[in-house]
Image: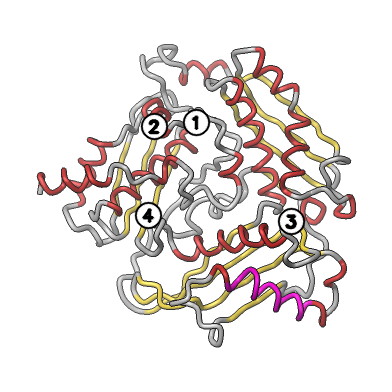
Amino acid sequence: MAANYSSGTHLFTSESVSMGHPDKVSDQVSDAVLDSLLAADPMARCACETLCTTGLVMVAGEVTVHNDKAVKALDNIEETVRETLREIGYTDPAMKFDAESCAVIRTIHGQSADISMGVSKGAGLHKEQGAGDQGLMFGFACRETRNLMPLPIDLSHRLVERQAVVRQKNIIKGLRPDAKSQVTVEYKGNKPQRIHTVVISTQHTAQWNGRAKQVALKKQVIKHIIEPCMPKRLYDSKKVKIHVNPTGQFEIGGPHGDTGLTGRKIIVDTYGGRGCHGGGAFSGKDPTKVDRSASYMARYIAKNVVAAGLADICEVQLAYAIGVPQPISVLVDTQGTATIDEGLISKLVRKHFPLTPAGIISHLKLRRPIYRETARHGHFGRSQFSWEKTDLAKKLAADAKRSA
């Protein structure tokens, strides 16, 4: 499991990328396709991958649908792609990648019958719906922020989220959709002490090219993007190191600057390198794929454990075998911060949280078209998602008190 810095001073850094980053463009397209299918057929199965580059979006994958509305949604994939690109902000041909002129290629085929047999209720060796794949998934929570997320990744997400607002409202003129953020926090033990370094790279039009223009842009970025996101008690403008477009300028970007692929930002999507990662990506996958649904459940468990006061830090590992309903292992690690025995916490987790794929899907209401929004600004730490609720914290606390 992850290192436990129980004493001493250290730095920890996490990054995020904006909705216009090429990999995030691919994630959002994949999840937009998934949402279009789930809106028509909540039982649809989907594994959708996207590649985007100069003037081109390619959508590929495996899909199972059960009605004519879902078939129509498949037929409308091109418009789903273009609508997603418009929403992100790729509407200017000067960026050499825009919603109206890019080519859209789709290559979609049916899901493997062997996989389907293991996932369909009663079709495989087990009567209950099994996991859509083998693998291990992690969830994490800690007390560093109100939403129980690690501070570096939470701030990194808020920065690119703010960049999008500033761009869309034209608060800083000439910003484009592609951007990256990075935040370094100084810790003493497990407690944040101060913001050490902030990095923002934001794509822009040619009006900001040149050293003098970049100096002016940096001042605008600090004022309108960085400072509104920083926690005042940890941010000292005289001591913090700030880098804005440290290469010198950032006119060429987006899918024209770098090819984007679904699933390449798995650390950005989770906890910024804090804790562990099982390796599975999220976007484009329906909730029968435990890479996604069990990761959401693991976060839900960890957050409720911390909210219940059972630990200050909690990491949960779940592991599954394809076609098998129950997890093959469940591990709770509190990194020495538990207020009760960790073994008891594990028993409470098994008691209060449904851990089969069907149970997870039902409890977290995952058969809804909710996924495009997850594909930008982080899957965790945002209150609109069901796995961010702490509705079982009181039950956990009460049960722990009775069992102690």
Left or right of 366 in this view: 301 = left
Vertical relation: 191 (above or below) 296: below
- Given residues 237 and 264, the one toward you in this image is 237
Amino acid identity at mark 4: Ala
Circle 3 residue: 177
| Separation (CA) of disc 3 from disc 4 | 30 Å
The residue located at (38%, 38%) in the rendering is 319
Residue 205 x, y percent position in the rendering: 84, 64
| Separation (CA) of disc 3 from disc 1 | 29 Å
Vertical relation: 340 (above or below) 392: below
The residue located at (75%, 75%) in the rendering is 217
Amino acid identity at mark 1: Pro
Circle 2 residue: 360
Q: How is the image coloured?
A: secondary structure
Circle 4 residue: 141
Mark nearest the camera among 3 and 4 is: 3
Which quarter of the image is occupied by the N terminus? bottom left
Vertical relation: 151 (above or below) 38: below
| Separation (CA) of disc 2 from disc 3 | 35 Å
Determine the secondary structure under disc 2. helix
| Residue farthest along the bottom direction in this orientation | 238
| Separation (CA) of disc 1 from disc 2 | 9 Å
Amino acid identity at mark 3: Pro
